[in-house]
Amino acid sequence: MTTLKEFLKTDRFATCTGVELLEIKPGYARARMEVTDRHLNGGGVCQGGALFTLADLAFAAVANSRKKLTLSVNANITFLRPAKLGYVYADATEVFNHHRIPFVEVKITDEQGELIAIFTSSGYRKESDLPVDTLE
Ligand SMILES: CC(C)(COP(=O)(O)OP(=O)(O)OC[C@H]1O[C@@H](n2cnc3c(N)ncnc32)[C@H](O)[C@@H]1OP(=O)(O)O)[C@@H](O)C(=O)NCCC(=O)NCCSC(=O)Cc1ccccc1
């Protein structure tokens, strides 16, 4: 039996950056990443691309939670506060479950629950079923 969580572990770049999927339900997913020295930019805060990667995997989990292959066709991120060393969490919600063009919002927060960034993305949902039996 294959789960969506296992399917998304094949995203090796996200795995290399330390992104872990914690929860996937229909229309909702949560992921986390530990910000370590290797994630810091020259300004001493978490690099924006690392936060984007965290949000992108959370997007992939929620957008594919309907078990149809869904890819991102556009994405935007707004950085509100710097992320420091420690865990950051991504809560992804499928705001609009359109059968073809779903819309997803991902909120990134730190260990104190402070909002770090907001990512939004539209997906393109293909007809093809994902080769997964369950979500987790
Ligand atoms: C999948 C699809 C969006 C659609 O494929 P197909 O069904 O084969 O159909 P086709 O390509 O023929 O397109 C149909 C029509 O739509 C048009 N069109 C397309 N895009 C746009 C646009 N932005 N804006 C406007 N129009 C657009 C296109 O020109 C065409 O128009 P036409 O009918 O000729 O007039 C494909 O274009 C693609 O791969 N794009 C790149 C996506 C990508 O690499 N994303 C990033 C990585 S995924 C990720 O991050 C998360 C993740 C991780 C792991 C697992 C899952 C998720």
Image (cartoon, helix red, strand yellow):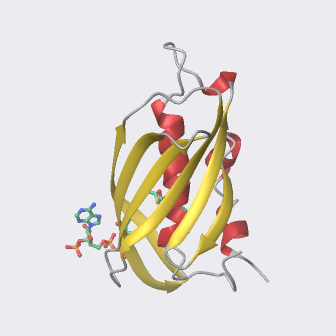
Quadrant in the picture for the C terminus: bottom right
Residue in view at x 55 percent, y 82 percent? 67
Q: In the image, 56: left or right of 8?
A: left
Query: Where is residue 58 shown, x and y percent of the image?
Result: 54, 58
Q: Hey, which residue is sitting farthest right in the picture? A: 1
Q: Hey, which residue is sitting farthest front in the picture? A: 112
Residue in view at x 54 percent, y 77 percent? 65
Residue in view at x 54 percent, y 79 percent? 26
Q: Is residue 80 above or below residue 54?
A: above
Residue toward you, 92 or 48? 92
Query: Where is residue 40 shown, x and y percent of the image?
Result: 58, 22
Q: Is residue 40 above or below residue 57?
A: above
Query: Where is residue 88 shown, x and y percent of the image?
Result: 59, 41
Residue 133, image quadrant: bottom right
Quadrant in the picture for the N terminus: bottom right
Q: Is residue 97 above or below residue 48?
A: below
Residue toward you, 23 or 65? 23
Residue in view at x 69 percent, y 60 percent? 22
Query: Where is residue 86 shown, x and y percent of the image?
Result: 67, 33
